[in-house]
Image: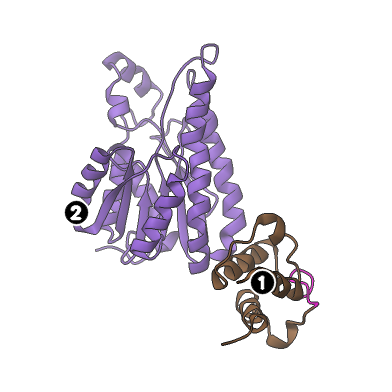
Amino acid sequence: MSTIEERVKKIIIEQLGVKEDEVKPEASFENDLGADSLDTVELVMALEEEFETEIPDEEAEKIRTVQAAIDYINKHSS
Amino acid sequence: MTSPLIGNLDGQVALVTGATRGIGKAIAEAFVAAGATVIGTATSEKGAATISEYLGAQGTGKVLDVTAEGAIEALIADVQSSYGKIDILVNNAGITRDNLLMRMKEDEWEQVLNTNLTAVFKICKAAMRGMMKNRHGRIINIGSVVGTTGNPGQANYCAAKAGLIGFSKALAKEIASRGVTVNAVAPGFIDTDMTKALTDDQRERIFDTIPAARLGKPEEIAAAVLFLASPGAAYVTGETIHVNGGMNMA
């Protein structure tokens, strides 16, 4: 069983088509990983599916970096 | 023989709202003939049964009241779990509540806007997630010539249909990069139950405004919709195809 961090990173790699070594904790989806606004919406959708959770819009807006995504899932997955 | 580019929908799943009769039925039948599986919606159980009957083995009728809370989301989830995906969405369901604006009640305005415009927003929102994931989808919204020309007694209907075109263009820009196209087809006067109610005198006057000097057939709308749903139309998005016998040329 992979850790949450590994699963989140795998989704980011798949969704944004980036390389594993680019997915650093502080990397910003839009500024560093080349995501546009639709990419980030799709990324949140993919996270929701993987972790069977619903991320409210106001929370989704705050998930802008790799670490923020990992932190959110850690905090909200049961 | 069908061309692989136009009119071949083998293996595709299509959802057509308002498919009991008229234009919606013609679209559903054209899709079935092209090889698609079709889910057609009606507002009543009886309508849904009618659709199931004419679709036969290649589809089914479902009840959908677009104004009922949660009904749209439930239907999309149902179709996706039964059929695995929705490739093509045709927003055809619509109503009229005609009245001169001086007499138009707020209720008449709201009913038309809710069914003809707000419901389209909700259906698209519910269906586009799967399309984006599949990197393939076709959304076709049925507008009307009066959305462009205006028509006395139909301020509500004209506003909703004009709104539909702006909506289609905005959504087309948002999701073009995901292989999903969004277009509109704007029919003129088509031979349906609605226009059968016209008197000979009214028909004559309408014909005077139509260079083709006749009403359109539902199948002629379905043909334009089939084109937009076909593989060959993948690069057409944000467009409105006017099918009106020359009555209004955009």
In this view, B223 is above or below B152: below
Kindly tell me whether residue B217 is visible in this rendering. Answer: no
Residues behind callouts 1 and 2 on a single chain: no
Kindly tell me whether residue B30 is visible in this rendering. Answer: yes
The label number, if any, that marks residue B58 in the structure image: none
* Subunit of label 2: B
> Which chain does the brown colour mark?
A
Q: Amino acid at mark 2?
A: Gly
Residue range of the region highlighted in magenta in the rendering: A26-32
The label number, if any, that marks residue B56 in the structure image: 2
Residue at the top extreme, as displayed: B102
In this view, B38 is above or below A29: above
* Residue at left offset 35%, top offset 41%: B18
User: Mark 1 = which residue?
Assistant: A73
Residue B62 image point, x, y percent: 31, 47
* Subunit of label 1: A
